[in-house]
Amino acid sequence: MTTQQGRQQGNQIEDQGRPTGLLLPSDPGFAALDPLPQARRDGLSRRNLLRLGVLGATGVALAGANATLGPYLAPRGLMSPNGIFAAAETLITDLVYLEAFPTSPLILEPFKDKLRIPKAARPEDKVIYSGWSKPPGPGEGQQNSLGNERHQKWSSDINCPDPIVYKFDLKVAGHSFTTSQVLPIDKNGRPTVSFDASGKTYPAGTKRSLPESTIYGFNGVFPGPMINAEYGRPVLVRFNNQLDENPAGYDRQDFGTKDLSFLTHLHNGHTAPESDGNPHYSMRYGPKYEGYRPGMWCDNLYLNWPAGGDDREKQSFFWFHDHRMDQTGSNVYKGLVGLYPIYDPKEYVRGEGGLDMGDERYGLRLPGVRTDNSDGSFDVEYDIPLAFSDFRLDDGVTIHKDIHDTEGDFPDAKNPSTHPEWWGKTFYKHFPNHGFVGDIFTVNGTAYPTMEVKRRKYRFRLLDASIARIYDFKLMSSTQGPKTAISLGYTGNELQGQYRIPDAQQCMKFTQIASDGGLLPFAVTRDNFELWPAKRREVIIDFTRYQDGSPTKKGDVIYLTNTMKMPDGRMWAASARFSPDPNYKVPMIKFVIGDDAPDDSVLPGPTKMLRDIPPLPSNWKTLLDNRLIFEVQRGTTIGETEWLINGKPFNPAAPSASLKNPAGKTPLAQQKLGSFNLWEIRNGGGGWVHPFHLHMEEHRTVMRNGKDVTAGGGVVHPDDKSREDLVALDPSESVIIYRGFRDFTGPYVGHCHNLAHEDHAMMFGWEITP
Ligand SMILES: [Cu+2]
């Protein structure tokens, strides 16, 4: 069978069960991109797993699959004598996946630990990095340790000074989510036994301290370092893989990339492909592999240059995270997250100072008191990133069983098995059927932190760094304070978040000033807002007064509260927009009002222009006929390619093709440098939501569910009025966006940012051509 014949629709079996997303040695370009044939074959066999839904139909014998599933299916009468599966797909699915999750121990003293407020990372001295054996630079072979790539554009190409250089080592380390004692509980909230690494068992009711969880971190910390960047001052980060070194002997457990490779993506930097950390690039160029392996480094150059040189395309809060093919979720969950606020020091009106330079005396006068360090870095007080991640900690009695275990990813774990020796450490399921959410909510790496705030205005930059959890935030006060969900009679999934504030009432509003696309055109006053995976929102909170106008006083307490109930990775069970549950009020951060402090910031009113949105051509509707259409859907197969786009799993070797558009064409996802187009993203499946992310340039939503949203009015998603880099797709929604393809050529990706979906093929390659 030829390669071409083999490359059929995703819901059909291919030659020998080979998924569409991977190359065979006969494929064009295979030899050129494969320094590691064995490693590739390992990856292949992983993806190759169990395309069960089609096996019965085609009668292809897959001895491996039968051997794996037989023990589960045969006793239940679900396997016919000839080995063809007789059960309905969902039934098989429930057998293949073990949807059991541990219940994390109850944190007994929430809001005791302080919120960790990151300091700006410090750059390398030029004298030092110039002396590196392979210093950064614009020359041929200078972009990575393999010596096979160069930077597409150097800072001098955009008339900027040499980049500020940082070096982040990827390291194994330990991390504590809390200093509080914990009470081990079962899924009904009852005290239960616990364990430790020495094999000891502790009786139910014993309070414990948590062991450190093992992380893979940029510089060995979670969340990783924060770069305070500025437009006009390029940054280069040397990401150096030391994940193979483990002198302290941290237990790597059974998740995270087995091969310890990484790929760092600055989400959503306007970045050349070699610095973008995406697998459509990495499988073909640079590492020619899923990521950079231990001992390798790569220099990601962030030009801090807006798309097209257009100031209206400037953004304000990026983050960087691992993007290693098939393992983004496990690596991000394991700690590979960093922060990247970006400021705009450009003086737009003489004498008024930079628009958004981290100094509240100038420009837009957003909260922030800036301190410049001698090395060129700077810190901004009252301007605080908040990264939200949810985790589950092992209870020692939940069986670890993942579809990956059949591949022997972690043979030492001997899964399926329980792991009492890992009690209290992070638990991860790489490929859950219903998605993955945690039951302990953390902010900047700490569960239930507290922060003493001055009586003044603050700018907060919120980031959802979770695998799948969506949050809906409100500012609330309470006289009774938080209660354990257990004491309120909840059990099972209702224990997620551990604490609730039964008497909490909204007490303040947010002034939203930015979304994931940067500053909004105008600030919006909001009672609450949703935060989807990878999205950002920036808000100003004025801690001097409540929404009714009454002043706050020292010692007052305000909780940042999550009201979205999301029991699994599919979608919410209750949210403010749909069937709210007034009892689901989980406190995330406790703000305690402190002393007065000077405040030169100004709350932007509803008519104060922050950042104008780039113009939409008046004839944009003429582009509708030839738009590119991408539909995200759950496949009819199970196995690791069950999440599909346009019926196909991710193929890192080639750009995807659009579904047939109104002009009757199915164009490849290739766009000319400097062009603009409409792309439609559809949610093809019913009971799922998808945060869909497109690399390279932010976009603007023009239609949602067939309705023009550019005129305003009737806008269901408030962010449809702003620029964004993620499309939040409610069930069965269709969104049409307008986007540009400027400044760089080469391969990029679009993918679902529910990381369990992304890691299981819900991604597509696209390209900018010269
Ligand atoms: Cu998704």
Image: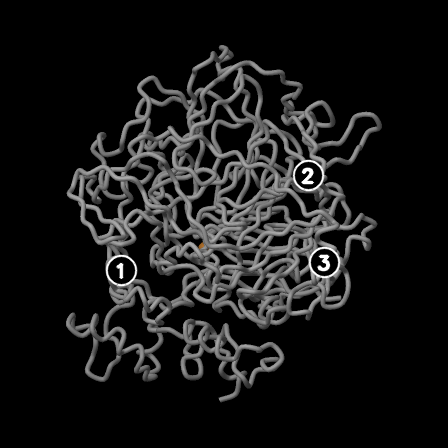
The residue to which callout 1 is attached is 98
Is 727 rendered above or below residue 591?
below
Q: Secondary structure at mark 1?
A: loop
Residue type at mark 1? Leu
Q: Are marks 2 and 3 in contact (CB under 8 Å)?
A: no
Relative horizontal placement of residue 320, taking residue 754 as reference (left or right):
right
Dot 3 lies on which element? loop
Left or right: residue 765 versus residue 44 is: right
Instruction: Determine which residue is flagged by label 3.
Output: 136
Instruction: Give the numbered dot on residue 377.
Output: 2
Q: Please report whichever mark, 1 or 2, sits nearer to the chain's N-terminal start.
A: 1
Mark 3 or 1: the one toward you: 3
- Viewport quadrant of the C terminus: bottom right
252 up-or-down from 700: above or below: below
Callout 2 secondary element: loop
Q: Nearer the viewer, residue 529 or 242?
A: 242
Q: In the image, residue 50 lies at what x, y percent?
A: 35, 73
Query: Circle 2: is it few (<14), some (14-19), or many (20+) Cα within 10 Å?
Result: some
Q: Say which of 641 and 210 sits in front.
A: 210
- What is the distance, in whole Å, between disc 1 and disc 2 at their CAs? 48 Å
Q: Residue furthest bottom?
A: 1
Q: Amino acid at mark 2?
A: Ser
For label 1, count other residues whose C-alpha is less than 10 Å away and answer few (under 14), some (14-19) or many (20+). some
- Which comes before the other along the chain, label 2 or label 3? 3
Q: Nearer the viewer, residue 593 or 653?
A: 593
